């Protein structure tokens, strides 16, 4: 079936707006016209490999559905929510993207965001429009639940009083706790916790902190870093003086982890004396480019991730993994298959609603139970959270991430 990519705009807009739509024979399956799915996440700098992977995942799901659902052709509008100045997500840009989506009468679903902080901006906008929003990657608990949330969350994201935001994988109240238990199981005694002072990074670090104290790990310090600073040796020198045998950091690839890991090695904070651990925000090959393979291996890198390793997926997940590799000739990025699942769920919601109406699609999405996703069956609760608790632990070997074990919650 012939399809096309159409690039709208020039210059910076090349990164900001990419449109994919079925063409040719697919139009025969669209007697009712078209509907649009918008996506929004950073598409610049260190995020390019991940953003390409997630875009591929959405495209793959739409193609798998034949480019149409319930008599409507599906057009995908990909938006960039990063600032050209910083290369990372920007609240003003994300708000502009969400407003653009809700103003488009053909837009039915918003597949976004990658960063939890960005979701905090867009959820109230899509909520007022009763538009279904589903994330391919957000894990901050407060977006959907009280556990690990700030005062007023998650209700503050629901100005209409009803939920419209969904995530189909475990949140950080699970990931942070699992990380702390894994650290203890590895024999660590004293941990110093760092975070990037952003919603996701601080959120998962706070959960790790609480759980560590609960299970008897000694937390000898917890600081937020200024990730824009190229020199993190002052805080690392302080950590060395505490005798910590583990540094846990909450953050994403573009908020300082490469500097921390590289300078840990410079200061001799390496195995077997000190290990580094983080969460899924670091699950990108860009880590090796910025920190250097030797440094990442020297600090005994460990990381949690909310999925089974792709090569061990079965059923829908196994099929998706093989299809992705056959189609794009590369391994999926860490959230590519969750983006694929997000688009599948959006298509399923439209199918169940049977019409091009935002409120009907939102309601249908929240009614999805026992859905076969890439990690097996799951159901959404009334807050839009999945009941899946699958977590894995990863290390690094020969400059590649290596699955180590399934982690139980």
Image (cartoon, grey):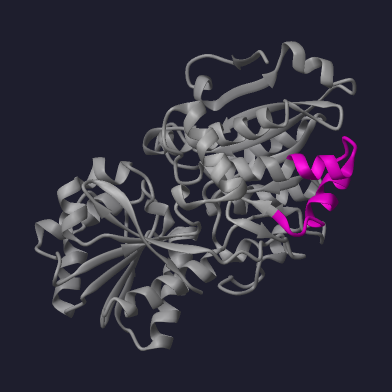
Which is more toward the observer, 334 or 199? 334
Q: Residue at x 90, y 39 (%)?
A: 354
Q: Is residue 123 left or right of residue 266?
A: right
* Vertical side of 360 occupied by 206: above or below: below
Q: Quadrant of residue 9?
A: top right
Q: Is residue 225 left or right of residue 322?
A: left
Q: Residue 45, position in %: x, y?
A: 38, 34
Which is more toward the observer, 318 or 236? 318
* Vertical side of 293 occupied by 329: above or below: above
Q: Residue 253, position in %: x, y?
A: 36, 48
* Vertical side of 326 occupied by 93: above or below: below
Q: Quadrant of residue 368?
A: bottom right
Does any portion of residue 269 appear in the rendered image? Answer: yes
Taking the magenta stretch, the answer to whether it contains residue 151 is no
| Principal secondary structure, stretch drawn in magenta | helix
Quadrant that contains the N terminus: top right
Q: Residue 200, position in %: x, y?
A: 48, 59
Magenta segment boundaries in residue numbering: 347-371
Q: Is residue 261 left or right of residue 151?
A: left
Q: Is residue 271 left or right of residue 305?
A: left
Q: Residue at x 64, y 22 (%)?
A: 20
Q: How many labels were placed on the picture? A: 0
Does any portion of residue 82 appear in the rendered image? Answer: no
Which is more toward the observer, 155 or 244? 244
Q: Residue 284, position in %: x, y?
A: 37, 45
């Amino acid at each position: 079936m012939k399809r096309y990519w159409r690039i709208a705009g020039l210059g910076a807009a090349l990164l900001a707006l990419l449109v994919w739509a079925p063409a040719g024979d697919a139009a025969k399956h669209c007697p009712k016209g078209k509907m649009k799915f918008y996506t929004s996440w950073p598409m610049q700098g260190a995020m390019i490999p991940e953003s390409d992977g997630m875009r591929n995942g959405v495209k793959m799901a739409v193609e798998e559905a034949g480019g149409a659902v319930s008599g409507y052709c599906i057009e995908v509008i990909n938006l960039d929510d990063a600032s050209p100045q910083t290369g990372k997500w920007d609240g003003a840009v994300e708000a502009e993207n969400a407003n653009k989506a809700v103003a488009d009468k053909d837009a039915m679903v918003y597949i976004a965001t990658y960063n939890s902080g960005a979701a905090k901006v867009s959820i109230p906008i899509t909520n007022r429009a009763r538009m279904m929003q589903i994330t391919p990657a957000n894990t901050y608990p407060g977006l959907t639940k009280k556990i690990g949330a700030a005062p007023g969350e998650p209700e503050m994201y629901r100005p209409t009083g009803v939920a419209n935001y969904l995530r189909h994988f475990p949140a950080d109240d699970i990931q942070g706790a699992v990380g702390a238990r894994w650290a203890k199981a590895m024999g660590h005694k004293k941990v110093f916790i760092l975070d990037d002072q952003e919603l996701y990074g601080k959120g998962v670090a706070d959960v790790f902190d609480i759980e560590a104290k609960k299970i008897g790990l000694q937390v000898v310090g917890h600081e937020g870093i200024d990730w824009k600073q190229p020199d993190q040796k002052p805080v690392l020198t302080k950590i060395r003086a505490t005798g910590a045998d583990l540094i846990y950091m909450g953050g994403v690839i573009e908020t300082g982890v490469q500097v921390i890991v590289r300078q840990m090695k410079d200061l001799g904070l390496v195995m077997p004396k000190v290990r580094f651990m983080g969460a899924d925000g670091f699950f990108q090959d860009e880590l090796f480019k910025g920190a250097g393979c030797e440094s990442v291996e020297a600090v005994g890198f460990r990381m949690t991730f909310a999925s089974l390793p792709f090569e061990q997926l079965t059923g829908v997940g196994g099929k998706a993994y093989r299809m992705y590799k056959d189609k794009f000739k590369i391994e999926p990025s860490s959230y590519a298959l969750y983006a694929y699942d997000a688009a599948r769920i959006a298509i399923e919601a439209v199918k169940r609603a049977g019409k091009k109406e935002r409120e009907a699609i939102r309601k249908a999405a929240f009614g999805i139970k026992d859905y076969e996703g890439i990690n097996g069956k799951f159901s959404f609760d009334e807050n839009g959270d999945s009941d899946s608790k699958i977590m894995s632990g990863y290390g690094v070997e020969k400059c590649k991430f290596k699955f180590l074990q399934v982690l139980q919650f």
